[in-house]
Amino acid sequence: MITRRALLSGLALAGGGGLLGLTSRPAAAEPPPETTRVRLVQIAGICVAPQYVAEELLRAEGFVDVQYVQFLTNPYKAFAAGDVDLSMAFVAPFILQVDRGNPIVLLGGVHVGCYELFGTDRVNTIRDLRDKTVSIPEIESPHHVFVASMASYVGLDPGKDIRFVTQAPTEAVQHLAERKIDALMAFPPLSQELRARKIGHVVVNSGVDRPWSQYFCCIVAANREFVRKHPVATKRALRAILKAANLCALEPDRAARRVADRGYNYDYALQTMREIPYGRWREFDPEDAVRFHALRLHEARMITSNPKKIIAEGTDWRFWNELKKELKG
């Protein structure tokens, strides 16, 4: 019997090799990774699909032990603690960690546009969040930080002008339907569920609405010590994720099935593959995303460092820049 995992691996490594860059000579010429273990995160969201699709690609890069550490909400402190080696997540909360001096380094962008701000009929623009109640899973969660960035961009003070309440996603959805809250930030599959159930309406879609659609949403970051000790492993892991992003764009059905194998809804996964521009990661600059969100968070008084310091102390684009050239297709 050929398992679905083996089938997808064979299709990706053989049939899609030319398009995905899976047979690139630089990879073959590199030394093996300094470690054969890599730990990534698994969160409730589907938008980080490339790192799930990348499992077999990671093995092809020499990682024998590929682990996915599960988190219900906020995984960012785990990077600093060394409980996660390398993974995708929303860029802005990483900036908070860098500002605090935590050992995190941002490596490269993967995709734009997975977050959507939903509101009741009382919220039609970001400015309408003034004196409104917004539900978030927890303080400094990606949902909280993205709302804060949006608010500061239009001149609101998220610390004073918005009432944030912490709720579990299921409770937040119910409260939005009952108009007990005014807005919430969501990403797949929750955003898809809200649209399917016709609860609230989309105020901002970061995949299509400017300026949010012009900046990376999810970026790959790593524990700084992991990068220092394992530069070859770091590049190989990043390569696998970027190749997987290409696969999500070129083979959405197969990618969705791989995501569904990890327990996610297949239909929502397929919708995510088709809506998020995974194949356009070369078109955007990760440093622009860091600069943009760092400015917003500085305006909101959520960080004390300026963007220049955040970029100098918390980023390393050398692997991403090399792979951008290597994986031209």
Image (cartoon, helix red, strand yellow):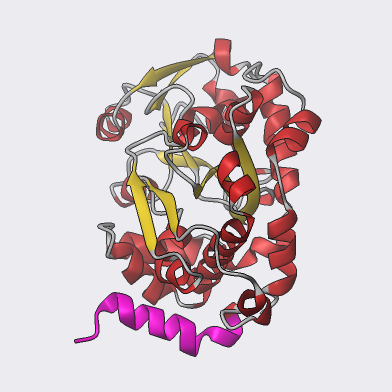
Q: Is residue 6 above or below residue 223?
A: below
Q: Residue at x 63, y 30 (%)?
A: 98
- Quadrant assignment, res 11: bottom left
Q: Is residue 218 visible?
A: no
Q: Please say if 66 is above or below 291.
A: below
Q: Residue at x 56, y 68 (%)?
A: 32
> Which secondary structure class fits the magenta region best?
helix
Q: Residue furthest bottom?
A: 15
Residue 135 sits in quarter: top left
The quarter in which the N terminus is drawn is bottom left
Horizontal and vertical percent position of residue 200: 38, 38
Question: Along the line of sight, which residue is nearer the eye, 146 or 103?
Answer: 103
Give how far across and how far down residue 246 sits, in percent: 55, 71
> Residue placed at 37% from the left, 60% from the top?
65
Tell me which segment is drawn in magenta: 1-19
| Residue drawn at the location 34% of the way across and 40% of the way down | 71
The question of residue 307 being in magenta is answered with no
Residue occupying the far right of the picture: 308
The answer, for residue 17, to whether it is visible in the render is yes
The residue lying toward the viewer, choosing from 46 and 159, is 46
Is 268 positioned to the left or the right of 53 in the image?
Answer: left
Q: Is residue 98 above or below residue 23?
A: above
Where residue 136 sits: x, y (%)?
40, 27
Residue 2 among magenta residues: yes
Q: Residue 156 location, x and y as percent?
A: 64, 19
